[in-house]
Amino acid sequence: MVGIGPGSADDITLRAANAIAASDYVIGVATYIDQIAFLLRDQKVIKGVMGEEVQRAMRAIELASEGHAVCIVSGGDPNVYGMGSLILEMLATRNEAIDIEIIPGVTAVNAIAAVLGAPLSGDHVIISLSDLLVPWSNIEKRLELAARSDFVIALYNPRSRKRARNLSRCIELLKKHRLTAPVGIVKNGRRPGEKTIITTVDALTNYESTVDMHTTIIVGNRQSFIWEGKIITPRGYRTKYEY
Amino acid sequence: MVGIGPGSADDITLRAANAIAASDYVIGVATYIDQIAFLLRDQKVIKGVMGEEVQRAMRAIELASEGHAVCIVSGGDPNVYGMGSLILEMLATRNEAIDIEIIPGVTAVNAIAAVLGAPLSGDHVIISLSDLLVPWSNIEKRLELAARSDFVIALYNPRSRKRARNLSRCIELLKKHRLTAPVGIVKNGRRPGEKTIITTVDALTNYESTVDMHTTIIVGNRQSFIWEGKIITPRGYRTKYEY
């Protein structure tokens, strides 16, 4: 299971690139296959579609069981809303041990944090607003707890056409706890058409309709501030040092 | 600001490797300089020591202001307990704009998650137990909220000789909320001497003394389970699919 990093070809690690280059089969959705096209020589490529993760995982396990070196590629990191847990859970259910290596990658949140400046800095939470696999009530509870404390909050899968309401509910909740906190919105991070918006929680509703499933959002905490188009969350050095 | 990824040389991204190769100066602590030694040709190298982040940041800004291409390297990602926010905060304080690029890297938590299996999977929080720059009361409040909800919890800087108590307090707190949850401890992740322990919250005290500042810990949630020496946190596919 190989994490190929966010959008751009050169955010892949050497380890991931070598694994893909040395494999017999490469399996992934079209966007990710395109992203690693420069590593493809005579590997067999199986392109899947979003939403068919279970079928893709089964095919990968089947091919690996037959003795092939199979790379199943995830955007970002396989463990962060990727295929990691699905494949291991499947193997656990069947109690089938095959030789597996998980190769970590740069996540979308780390990539967009770099674009936005230094919004994460210290403690932070990663939350997906997709309620496809998790009940909304759980997500809302987590959001509420994160917003009440002083975590920086990163939001994955913030809005799809079918679940536009989730982001609206999330914004209402954030408004209660950190109305003026900076917010960074990055659409198509590290891909053609990258678009960055820097705003604050109280103005977030204005940008709601531009948010889609290719967008990642970072909400600063009460110490975060905006300078020269960058979001900065102080780490606390100012309490100890003069500069 | 360049994230060079966790411990091993080949977890660096192509973008980070290219930036280091093309720079005039490379600044970082000795461990990180050693990690990227294969990229050093005729760059000038400035080795710093842990705890002197402020001096290192000042030197980097000074050299960059003089027109040099300067790489300041962080283990993992510059935005995750790295130098990212410190440097931007310094520039903001002086209102000094220099041309900066932040290059993201694979974080320690994503690297050790890969070693442990698929413990993160979905929503998770990243917390540092170091109270050097942040009051312990803040850290404890965040831990409490994270443990009460169902976030997977990743712990950075879990224990130093001077702050051995922080981990003990953290364990007491975790015991109240998720006594049987799996815990993965990785010491020297992706470095020589890598050591992995898989246990549960109720037995965590037994391993306390082996934990140090080169250790990262992941605490599963109430759905996480252990199979064949791996921690797996289900993502929720079982609620929708048969496999």
Image (tube, coloured by chain):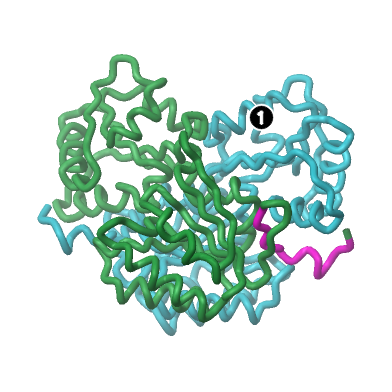
Chain colours: A green, B cyan
Answer yes or no: is residue A123 visible: no
The residue at 82%/41% (across/down) is B60
- The front one of B113 and A118 is A118
Residues A170 and B226: in front is A170
Rendered view: B230 above or below A182: above
Q: Residue A232 magenta-drawn?
A: yes
Query: In which quadrant will I find the N terminus of chain A?
Result: top left
Dot 1: element = helix
Q: Residue at x 29, y 33 (%)?
A: A30
Query: In the displayed image of the protein, which residue is found farthest to the left?
Result: B242
A71 or B165: nearer the eye? Answer: A71
* Position of A210 relative to A68 (above/below): below
User: What chain does badge 1 belong to?
Assistant: B
In the rendered image, which quarter is residue B140 located in? bottom right
Q: Is residue B63 left or right of residue A9?
A: right
List the residue tagged with mark 1.
B19
What is the magenta range? A230-242
Q: How crowded is the residue under tag 1: few (<14 C-alpha within 10 Å), some, or many (20+)?
A: some
Looking at the picture, which amino acid does disc 1 mark? Ala
Q: Residue at x 75, y 43 (%)?
A: B29
Q: Which residue is at the far top? A: A42
| A119 relative position to A206: left or right | right
Identified at 47% across, 78% down, the residue is A145
Question: Which quadrant of the structure image shows residue B135?
Answer: bottom right
Above-or-below relation of A104 to B166: above
